[in-house]
Amino acid sequence: MDNLLTSSLLEWLGDHRQWLGLAIFLIALLESLAVAGLVIPGVFLLLGVTAMAGGGGMPFASALAWAFCGAVLGDMFSFALGRFFHEDIRRLSLFRRHPQWIARGEIFFRRYGLFGIFIGRFVGPIRPVIPMIAGMLDMPSIRFVTINLLSALAWAPVYVTPGFLAGRAVKWPVPEFFWQHALTLLGLLSGLLLAVILILRAQKRWSNILAGLLCLAALVLVSVNGERLAILDQSLAVWLSIADTNGWLAGAMADLASPLYPAALFFLLAVSLTASQAWRALSFTLLALVTGGLLAVALDASQQATVLAASLVLIAIAALLKNRPHAFWTRAAFMSGVAPQAILLGAISLAVMHLSLMGLIDAFLLAATSLLLSLWVVERAGPVECPASPARHLLLWVPLASAIGVVSGLHYF
């Protein structure tokens, strides 16, 4: 029945494209709304509607704005619901039948606090419940509104971009053998990711070095077989020229793909770790950056790929150090919060700085290899511990604070 209703809605919107903006707003709102977000196929609907928006010529900024506003209002309604009902929310029939929804969300919120609202927006079943629990536990409104706005800014591009680009790509030229090459590359990278996760899941002393060597082998193979990616690089260059990505995004976000951003990240991270005397964590950070730089020189990686890899390394280290004490799958879920930031930086590097597809893959593999190998080396002398407070809590804000400083031009003062 749900599939039938979803198909009917998408078919109706295909015939009434003037309502696509409002549809994106409403779907984003319901996707973020407590109770409703648990039962409607919001992600599937948003993918379909944004694809129509992309194919129908809607400006990308408009689609982002509709999704952002819907996500913000959905979370605000959920927060207000929790604040109004408090503990009585548990008596609602839906939550009496599924008490685990609130239980999981409450554990997550109590463990991660303010940052839990940010990362919770990207974590499946608890996504629409976390704002309601924040209201139920009387979180100060100004704090919630602030993190709600910031998390929606990250959420909107991640959820809108894939469908929007898919809709635009229908009209873009596709050369012969493109999909064969693209699907092969996607399959190999997915297999690599799965293998790395399984190796790290073993949690043995050799897990980090084996996963790091696997990423290093993939990095070498990509560098050696770069010519085979030529058809994908050429197609990407044509698509980006058609998409005309040199507008507002270039002016607002270009500095995030420059060396200024990793420099700001390193400065704030180094200050936090030094203040808490987390010398092993600081050594890990320095070694990861040096390892990445040496690998970039040895494999003749481009400057833009090296800069992107440095940013990814530092963002991942900030998240990794924060969640060190937790179980593997909790750490893995927490690290998934790095994905939206990585996707955004990668998109900026591609669209604004004209990084090639091979350069993008190089950057991600460089970051993974240097992180895993450096972590193995440093932990030979002992585990890398989570820094003491307040540095432990400040680590989560390092990427955002660095981005605000760079984009706003504070580095000129």
Image (tube, helix red, strand yellow):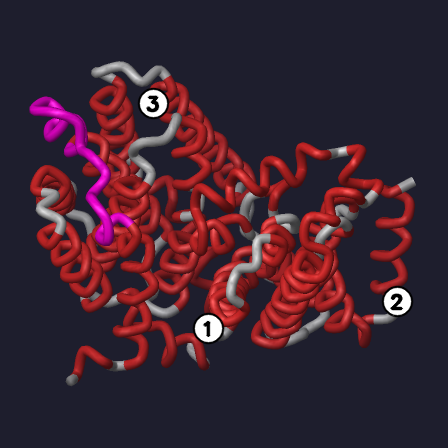
Q: Is residue 242 visible?
A: no
Pick the front one: 26 or 209: 26
- For the N terminus, the image quarter is top right
- Whichever of callouts 2 and 3 sits on the residue coming sooner in the sequence is 2
Label 3 residue SS:
helix
Number of other residues with Cα within 10 Å of mark 1, as a class: few under 14, some 14 to 19, many 20 or more: some
Number of other residues with Cα within 10 Å of mark 3, as a class: few under 14, some 14 to 19, many 20 or more: many
Label 3 to label 1, Cα distance in Å?
Answer: 38 Å
Left or right, residue 115 beside residue 295:
right
Magenta: predominant secondary structure element?
loop
User: Looking at the rendering, which quadrant does residue 351 occupy?
Assistant: bottom left
What label sits on residue 200 in the rendered view? 3
Label 2 to label 3, Cα distance in Å?
Answer: 49 Å
Residue type at mark 3: give it: Leu
Magenta stretch bounds: 374-392
Residue highlighted by disc 1:
245
- For the C terminus, the image quarter is bottom left
Q: Residue at x 51, y 41 (%)?
A: 108
Residue highlighted by disc 2:
15
